[in-house]
Image (spheres, rainbow, N blue to C red):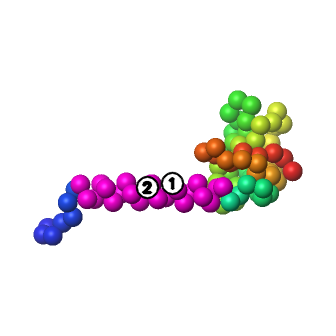
Amino acid sequence: MPNQVNDHIKHDRANRLLALSKELNRDFALKQIGKSLKVLFEKRDGDYLIGHASDYLKVKVKTDRDMIGEIVDIRIDKYDGILEGSVV
């Protein structure tokens, strides 16, 4: 097909879009700090329960309670690649 975009340009554009997406996701996650989110817990990973908030953000909570399958109010305390919080 004529007038195709060069492969190098395609890859560069895709990488720039991925970087922008990661930045926007991080910025959105940081705005959740201090808020209370409803989280559905799905699995345990060591000392943490892992779940997703209603806006699909991944959240972890350090607890020994078994809340898998439950929707729980969680106060978001910090972000280090994944939101971390505590039970309200």
Q: Residue at x 25, y 59 (%)?
A: 9
**Mark 2 touches mark 1? (CB < 8 Å):** yes
Q: Residue at x 15, y 70 (%)?
A: 3
Above or below, 52 against 4 in this view is above
Of helix, strand and loop, which mostly describes the magenta segment? helix
User: Which quadrant does the N terminus fall into?
Assistant: bottom left
SS at badge 1: helix
Q: Is residue 69 visible?
A: no
Above or below, 65 against 72 in this view is above
Q: Position of residue 51 (x, y in %)?
A: 69, 47
Residue extending farthest bottom: 3
Residue extending farthest left: 2
Q: Tell me which corner region of the image, top left, top right, bottom left or bottom right, holds residue 10.
A: bottom left
Q: Amino acid at mark 2?
A: Leu
Above or below, 77 against 17 in this view is above
SS at badge 2: helix
Residue range (magenta): 8-30
Q: Is residue 69 left or right of residue 57?
A: right
Q: CA distance from mark 2 to mark 1?
A: 6 Å
Q: Residue at x 21, y 64 (%)?
A: 5
Q: Amino acid at mark 1?
A: Lys
Say which residue label 1 marks.
22
Q: Residue at x 20, y 60 (%)?
A: 6
Say which residue label 2 marks.
18
Q: Is residue 6 left or right of residue 71?
A: left
